[in-house]
Amino acid sequence: MSAFQDTLIITQRQLRLLTRVPEVLIFSTIQPVMFVLLFRYVFGGSIDTGQPGGYVQLLMPGIFVQTVAFTLAGTASGLAEDMKKGLIDRFRSLPISQSALVVGRTLGDSLLNIVVLLVMGIAGYAVGWRPSSGAGNVALGFLFLLLFGYALSWVGALVGLSASDARVVQNVSFIVTFPLTFLSNAFAPTTGMPRALQYFAEWNPVSTMVAACRELFGLENQFGATAGSFPSEHPLTTSLIYIVIIMAIFIPLSLRRYRNASN
Amino acid sequence: MKSIIAEDLVKSYDKGTVRALDGLNLDVEEGTVLGVLGPNGAGKTTTVRILSTLLRPDSGRATVAGIDVIKNPEKVREVIGLSGQYAAVDEILTGYDNLVMFGQLYHLGKKNSVIRANELLERFGLTDAATRPIKTYSGGMRRRLDLAASLIVKPKVLFLDEPTTGLDPRGRQDMWGVIEDLVKEGVTLLLTTQYLEEADQLADEIAVIDTGKVIARGTSDALKKQVGGERLEVVVESQHVARTLEIVTTVAGITPSFDEGIRQISAPVSTGSKALLDVLKSLDEAGIHPLDIGLKRPSLDDVFLSLTGHSAEAKEEAK
């Protein structure tokens, strides 16, 4: 019970940070909205989707997934900053639950994602995104996105707690997330990629997430190289498996790293 | 009763290549202040981190308030306060927010956390700055807030790791005042410092550490005695140097050393204040008024030099 309270206090701290530095919230939402507009109007005209409603229908799930994937960087740099400032030492010397700081941080980052996804959804709607699957499925899609973001937040936790220097963290997170989001079906069909990359893209969790969201938002998904393979046939199941695997690996690793933070 | 006991602590970093602690032993009597003095890299911070449960030693044993730090770290955390080299508070939050948050983490409840936060802000002279983010605080204010955060629940044992490193003289004086008040209230304090003056000022006993071991232990006076007796130092105007040298030689019975740059004549004396009076009387008879005169006991710097063969600062530069 007290572990739960401790976690909530840490989450509260993070929300308070957002009110103290509103720029964080503003820029975390401006960036994805900017992506929506850029991709919608730069690529939208030249990519033939063969789907009713045009490119923006395919694009939105892609940008949603990309945005929640960047939670990794947010959690990582937040924790690295806490390490550098000695805050982690202070928390670890307190008689509180030894997981509260990290759990609270990941939850706080997920709460931020709710706001960001909401704003993006509105921006998407404004430029023609119309999910056709009904409110229930759309909500389920967003829930799924939050869950994926939460899982990646734990990858970020390990990166942030392991980094020797807070400045490295941003770069590492970028190097991990950027190729993952682009070597996928998020923005363009994978069929144009070299064969080997097509396989990678197909099994890439970002692709399965995007495909799952497209399905939940009422679209037919398009996959490249190996139509009929497990991830292309069952994107939802595959994504769920990925999420479980990521959490099963990175939650214990991050917590252990935290407990040994200075060893 | 001993509030802190450390026995044979060993800790290596980087797969054993750097031995931070090499069989360190120390203990602190309840309600007293132990100053752990040593240059950078001597093992001060590692010692504090082990005693405050942040770090596990490779071998050795330690108890704080009678509780084993390795077997029961969570129990130790309930009775200690830790304030480190870096002000470990959230820079973006205000001083008030920080203290309330830590109060809640100590499970004081929201209401009591607010009361305690206000008390501590008042006590450390931070009430006016309470609603400002920490990043607008001066170095001294940050340290005081950090110290306040470690006192939310009155700790039995307090660890202060270099509490004044990086502070200006004014900030240091303020911090010393705050620490002295705490000690009067009876907290057991282990304080690390690389300032010899600071250990002298605040600590009941001093443990000098170098390369991961305690190399000397005792009161400031005892350590100074170990180095040698008092010195008489006198500064005069240049036309009086020759005559003054003669007077000091007569009184001390030994040829004094003379520092030309600051026109300071100094000599070891065994008769203390009597030697001082004799020299003053002779100078007066010769019509010489010294610019400065006094008996100097050896500084802890001298102690360090004589114990380790190198001065605290010299080692730091060598690193």
Image: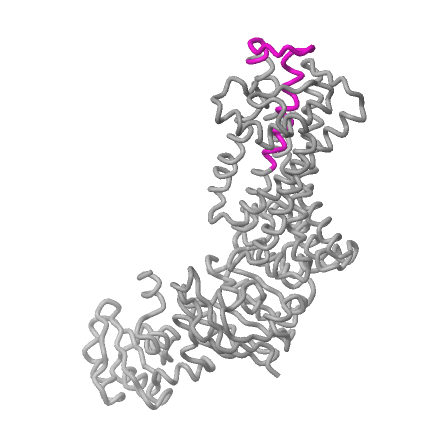
Front residue (pair A231, B252):
A231
The image shows residue B258, relative to residue B254, as above or below, that is above
Q: Is residue B292 visible from the viewing direction of this image?
A: yes
Q: Quadrant of the C terminus of chain B?
A: bottom left
Front residue (pair B70, A13):
B70
Residue A148 is one of the magenta-drawn residues = no
A26 relative to B267 in the view: left or right: right
Residue A171 x/y as whole percent: 48, 37
B42 relative to A60 in the view: left or right: left
Count how many numbered circles sit on residues in the image.
Answer: 0
Q: Quadrant of residue A135?
A: top right
Residue A94 x/y as whole percent: 65, 61
Q: Quadrant of the N terminus of chain B?
A: bottom right
Residue A64 is one of the magenta-drawn residues = yes
Q: Is residue B141 visible from the viewing direction of this image?
A: no
B301 relative to A198 in the view: left or right: left
The image shows residue A164, relative to residue A90, as above or below, that is above
A137 relative to B35 in the view: left or right: right
Q: What colouring does the structure picture have?
A: one colour
User: Which residues make up the magenta segment?
Assistant: A43-71
At x 58%, y 9%, the residue is: A45
At x 64%, y 70%, the residue is: B72
Residue A154 x/y as whole percent: 61, 44
